[in-house]
């Protein structure tokens, strides 16, 4: 039952990422930079495992006649994707964070690591799926691509990170209001919601 | 729907909106009844001995309590007077708004000026309306055939026209002036101390306030200034001690307000509301020697950070001074005689002294609560217990006891009665006119629904989702005090989102062009950092107040670039019909006049911003004449643009000259940044999208230029350009432009749909069809009504909130200002621009 495996792995992945976030939240609030750097490999691993599983199952589903593909043939594109997400993706997201108001005279490691996490969350699945097809990338940026987990996950991540900035100015003087905790929580939350919505409405067109 | 019908709707909404706002304001801002005429002793009042017959009242502007009483104070002599029992120190709690004019009013009349006084600030600075109509201790001295002299801040001369026998006012014109303003006062002192023809001398020193505004309470100039002020105290005290004609003189050293850590004031931070107050006279040892613990100086705060010694209300000064001088208490006084001073009278007289204060407070209660007189005149028994009663009944019961208290000479119970009366009179909450407030909300809500009905159904495309998002997100922020204080973040976040959405839409239209979108976002980010605003991070490092002053050469290169760019616009557009040479001359003359004024102004207002290589070039002619020359050039240029060149860029160029003149020098490069942003805006924006951009950038620009929802952030530095007298209309107009320079710039660049004239950008076919139905003119008006309704409802629901007077009321004043700006700037000026280029 490949599709059942796929659905199960999606939910497993969502729950997994959610619990990683919940588990590390206290230490993220206490020491953001070191927590972010310590959890980055874990996140990369979780994302890679999930991407490989879903690719495996989707290929099985599509081409029943062809012999079962080996996991190893997916390794190279995966490594390239990780490399791309870790460098270019992180750089672009870092720039966007700064353009949207992230501090530039302080907190540089925090911001860069936040960008890396956001990139591993959203850019990695997109690169793995879209490769270097410029037209498909344009469709994604224009919000016109067909709905799937990677696309809506990325969109949710962006919206979540943007909305994550909202509680920062409040005068509650809570530790969690500090940079970049809310942004990161917003990004994770947005990604997980977006991904779930994407898996439900898979293949549909964007409503606008 | 025809255009003319739309304009009728806009006109109707913009008439309803100010009406609703004014109605709400009338119900919301407490109006205190004020009794005309001067108080006189009546038959009931027993005349008592007067401990003093002269007063020297020395105000040091922004004299925060710790400046005098703290460990690191420069007031060594004053502190020695305190420890040697010849001075009695207090912290005088000043109520918000902590700005000079209302504080002087509180000190002299004993009343508690509220927010209405801030609105009336301009009108009251005018000599036509003043405290001439309100009873105060200066008028009492004069009415009892005393003579007054005054040196220092001319606020006093404006508030009390014709009051002073001799005077020399100084204007607080340039904050960079730390010495002249004070020397101007000090030079009169020795002369006056030798004379014996005056009964009250008022001195008001401005230097300390200037230092605070310029570089904060920790400025290196602060301690020398304290030492200087201490020297003045010593001179006056020595004269009092040695000259026989001054032997019975009361010397008061007082701050009108304090300052916060950034050196500003206006709000209700502890630093702002805690000025020092010292009563000085050799006679006062009669009081301080009776204290259980002798006074010590320097001292540590007894409460909070700035609460040194006993804290009294600033309004208590008025009844104290008149009682010490043996005069009637001013009619509108809400203060209570400071209890410590009672010891200066015989025990037999003390009750009679307090009774005068009590009678005066009672007369105000009778005026505001008509039922009080009947209640208080009911017969009573001496053993009646008042504590079980509350409100007016309680106060009336207390009053019924007074004959008994007076006969037994119980001064302390009478003082207790006074404080009870004071707390009822000072509480503003009872004065809301809720029905009127609700009616104001009702009227404004009608105009909001009307506006939304016009705007929303016609929207399509990006703005159809962005405008509802903007509107719905804005409303809840008006109910949270920190979002009001940090409102700039809302606009920065929304503007960033808007420009990103415009950038992403390019991809939808098939292009992969991202450069101009990224430039827009980058410049917006730079703009955000220009001036640190809001409360939470006030004073944090930014570009305009920290980086540029450290790099003045970079500042002036940016300023030059801005002016040269405007010059080329003037040359190539505004004066183009004149021919190349003549246009060049006119453009150069206009720009040069404006630049010279900017440089001369900076040279006087903030010399630290002028690099050494520019200093020799600073013009020495009068600033007023220079500013008038610039305004003349602007008027000429506008007229020429309106009648001859008639293009948007030509109006834009000459308006930019005006706005550069009305902006702080450190903010002028922002106008150039805005110009690049406007130039990078994507082509093919619909009129509604342009209007959304204009709305966002007006708000972003307002905050980026240093604006905030706090009274202390109003920029008055450009309000007197070219003005040498005082003209309410001109000064108010210049202040509005000075604070809304960014708004006016964006309105000029994006003035709204122009019929005919300019070619509309190429649009997709379906866009073209729909464009005719959209109503871009409605965007601004709808937002202004929405904002007004949100803030009104917030102020009504949160009227007992702790921050109602410090956060929500100032925001309401800003709503009024934005509404005024919408009428003058967006509607009237926008109409002018559209007609000039048609």
Image (tube, coloured by chain):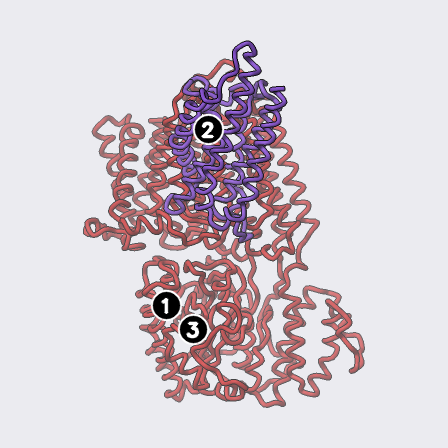
Chain colours: A purple, B red
Q: Secondary structure at mark 1?
A: strand
Q: Which residue lies under the disc numbered 3? A: B70
Name the spot of residue A30 as percent of width and height, x first: 49, 51
Q: Which residue lies under the disc numbered 1? A: B168
| Residue closest to the eye, A47 or B241 | A47
Placement of B715 over or under B70, stated as above or below:
above
Can you tell which quarter of the image residue B789 is in? top right
Left or right: B803 in relation to B265: right
Q: Residues within 10 Å of mark 1 (few under 14, many from 20)?
A: some
Q: CA distance from mark 1 to mark 3?
A: 32 Å
- Residue most extreme to the top: A65
Q: Residues within 10 Å of mark 2 (few under 14, many from 20)?
A: many
Q: Secondary structure at mark 3?
A: loop
Viewer-nearest of discs 1 and 3: 3
Name the spot of residue B742 as percent of width and height, x first: 41, 40
The subunit letter for the residue under badge 1 reads: B
Name the spot of residue B382 as percent of width and height, x first: 78, 82
Q: Which residue lies under the disc numbered 2? A: A124
| Residue closest to the eye, B746 or B6 | B746
Label 1 or label 3, whichever comes before in sequence order: 3
Same chain shared by disc 1 and disc 3: yes
The subunit letter for the residue under badge 2 reads: A
């Amino acid at each position: 039952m490949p599709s059942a495996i796929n659905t199960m792995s999606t939910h497993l992945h969502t729950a997994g990422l959610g619990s990683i976030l919940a588990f590390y939240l206290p230490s993220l609030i206490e020491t953001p930079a070191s927590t972010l750097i310590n959890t980055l490999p874990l996140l990369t691993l979780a994302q890679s495992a999930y991407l490989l599983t879903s690719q495996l199952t989707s290929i099985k589903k599509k081409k029943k006649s062809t012999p079962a593909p080996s996991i190893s043939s997916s390794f190279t594109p995966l490594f390239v994707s990780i490399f791309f997400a870790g460098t270019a993706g992180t750089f672009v997201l870092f720039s966007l964070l700064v353009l949207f108001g992230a501090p530039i005279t302080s907190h540089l490691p925090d911001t860069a690591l936040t960008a890396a996490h956001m990139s591993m969350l959203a850019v990695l699945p997109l690169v793995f799926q879209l490769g270097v097809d410029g037209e498909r990338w344009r469709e994604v940026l224009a919000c016109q691509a067909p709905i799937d987990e990677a696309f809506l996950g990325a969109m949710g991540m962006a919206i979540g990170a943007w909305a994550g900035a909202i509680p920062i100015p409040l005068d509650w003087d809570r530790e969690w209001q500090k940079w970049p905790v809310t942004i990161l929580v917003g990004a994770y939350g947005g990604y997980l919601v977006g991904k779930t919505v994407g898996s439900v409405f898979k293949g549909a067109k964007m409503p606008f | 729907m025809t255009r003319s019908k739309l304009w009728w709707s806009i006109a109707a909404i913009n008439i309803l909106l100010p009406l609703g706002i004014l109605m709400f304001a009338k119900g919301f801002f407490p109006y205190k009844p004020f009794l005309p005429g001067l108080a006189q002793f009546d038959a009931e009042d027993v005349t008592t001995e007067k401990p003093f017959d002269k007063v020297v009242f020395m105000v040091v502007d922004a004299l925060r309590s710790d400046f005098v009483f703290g460990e690191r104070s420069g007031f060594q002599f004053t502190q020695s007077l305190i420890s040697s029992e010849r001075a009695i120190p207090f912290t005088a709690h000043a109520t918000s708004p902590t700005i000079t004019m209302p504080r002087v009013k509180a000190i002299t009349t004993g009343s508690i000026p509220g927010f209405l006084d801030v609105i009336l600030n301009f009108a009251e600075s005018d000599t036509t309306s003043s405290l001439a109509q309100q009873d105060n201790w200066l008028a009492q001295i004069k009415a009892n055939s005393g003579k007054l002299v005054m040196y220092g801040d001319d606020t006093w001369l404006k508030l009390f026209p014709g009051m002073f026998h001799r005077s020399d006012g100084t204007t607080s014109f340039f904050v960079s002036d730390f010495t002249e303003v004070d020397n101007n006062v000090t030079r009169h002192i020795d002369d006056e101390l030798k004379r014996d023809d005056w009964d009250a001398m008022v001195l008001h020193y401005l230097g300390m306030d200037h230092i605070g505004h310029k570089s904060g309470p920790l400025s290196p100039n602060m301690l020398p200034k304290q030492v200087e002020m201490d020297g003045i105290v010593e001179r006056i005290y020595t004269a009092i001690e040695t000259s026989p004609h001054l032997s019975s003189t009361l010397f008061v050293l007082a701050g009108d307000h304090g300052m916060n850590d950034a050196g500003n004031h206006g709000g209700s931070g502890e630093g702002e509301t805690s000025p020092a107050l010292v009563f000085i006279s050799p006679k006062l040892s009669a009081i301080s020697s009776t204290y259980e613990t002798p006074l010590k100086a320097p001292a540590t705060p007894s409460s909070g950070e700035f609460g040194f010694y006993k804290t009294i209300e600033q309004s208590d000064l008025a009844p104290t001074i008149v009682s010490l001088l043996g005069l009637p208490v001013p009619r509108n006084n809400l203060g209570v005689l400071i209890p410590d001073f009672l010891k200066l009278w015989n025990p037999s007289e003390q009750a009679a002294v307090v009774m005068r204060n009590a009678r005066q407070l009672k007369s105000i209660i009778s005026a505001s609560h008509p039922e009080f007189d009947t209640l208080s005149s009911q017969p009573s028994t001496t053993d009646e217990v008042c504590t079980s009663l509350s409100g007016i009944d309680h106060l009336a019961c207390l009053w019924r006891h007074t004959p008994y208290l007076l006969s037994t000479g119980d001064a302390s119970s009478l003082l207790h009665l006074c404080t009870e009366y004071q707390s009822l009179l000072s509480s503003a909450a009872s004065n809301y006119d809720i029905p009127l407030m609700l009616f104001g909300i009702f009227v404004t809500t009608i105009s909001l629904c009307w506006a939304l009905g016009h705007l929303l159904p016609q929207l399509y495309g990006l703005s159809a989702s962005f405008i509802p998002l903007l509107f719905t997100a804005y409303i809840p922020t008006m109910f949270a005090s920190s979002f009001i204080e940090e409102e700039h973040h809302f606009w920065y976040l929304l503007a960033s989102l808007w420009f990103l959405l415009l950038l992403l839409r390019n991809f939808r239209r098939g292009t992969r062009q991202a450069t101009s979108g990224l430039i827009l976002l980058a410049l917006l980010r730079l703009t955000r950092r220009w001036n640190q605003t809001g409360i939470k991070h006030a004073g944090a490092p930014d570009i305009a107040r920290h980086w540029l002053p450290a790099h003045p050469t970079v500042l002036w290169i940016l300023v030059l670039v801005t002016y040269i760019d405007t010059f080329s616009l003037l040359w190539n557009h505004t004066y183009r019909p004149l021919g190349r040479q003549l246009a060049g001359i006119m453009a150069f003359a206009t720009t040069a006049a404006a630049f010279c004024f900017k440089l001369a102004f900076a040279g006087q207002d903030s010399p630290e911003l002028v690099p050494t290589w520019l200093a020799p070039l600073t013009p020495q002619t009068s600033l007023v004449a220079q500013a008038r020359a610039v305004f003349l050039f602007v008027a000429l240029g506008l007229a020429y643009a309106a009648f001859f060149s008639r293009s948007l860029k030509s109006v834009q160029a000459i308006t930019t000259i005006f706005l550069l003149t009305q902006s702080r020098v450190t903010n002028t490069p922002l106008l150039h940044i805005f110009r690049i942003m406007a130039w990078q805006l994507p082509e093919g924006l619909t009129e509604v999208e342009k209007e959304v951009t204009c709305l966002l950038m007006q708000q972003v620009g307002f905050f980026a230029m240093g604006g905030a929802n706090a009274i202390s952030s109003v920029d008055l530095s450009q309000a007197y350009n070219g003005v040498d007298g005082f003209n309410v209309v001109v000064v108010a107009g210049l202040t509005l432009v000075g604070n809304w320079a960014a708004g006016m710039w964006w309105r000029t660049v994006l003035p709204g749909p122009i019929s005919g004239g300019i070619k509309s950008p190429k649009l997709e076919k379906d866009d073209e069809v729909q464009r005719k139905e959209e109503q871009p003119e409605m965007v601004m008006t709808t937002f202004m009504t929405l904002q007004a309704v949100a803030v009104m409802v917030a102020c009504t629901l949160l009227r007992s909130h702790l921050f109602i007077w410090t956060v929500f009321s100032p925001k309401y004043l800003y709503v009024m200002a934005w509404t005024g700006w919408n009428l003058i700037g967006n509607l009237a000026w926008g109409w002018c621009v559209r007609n000039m280029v048609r």
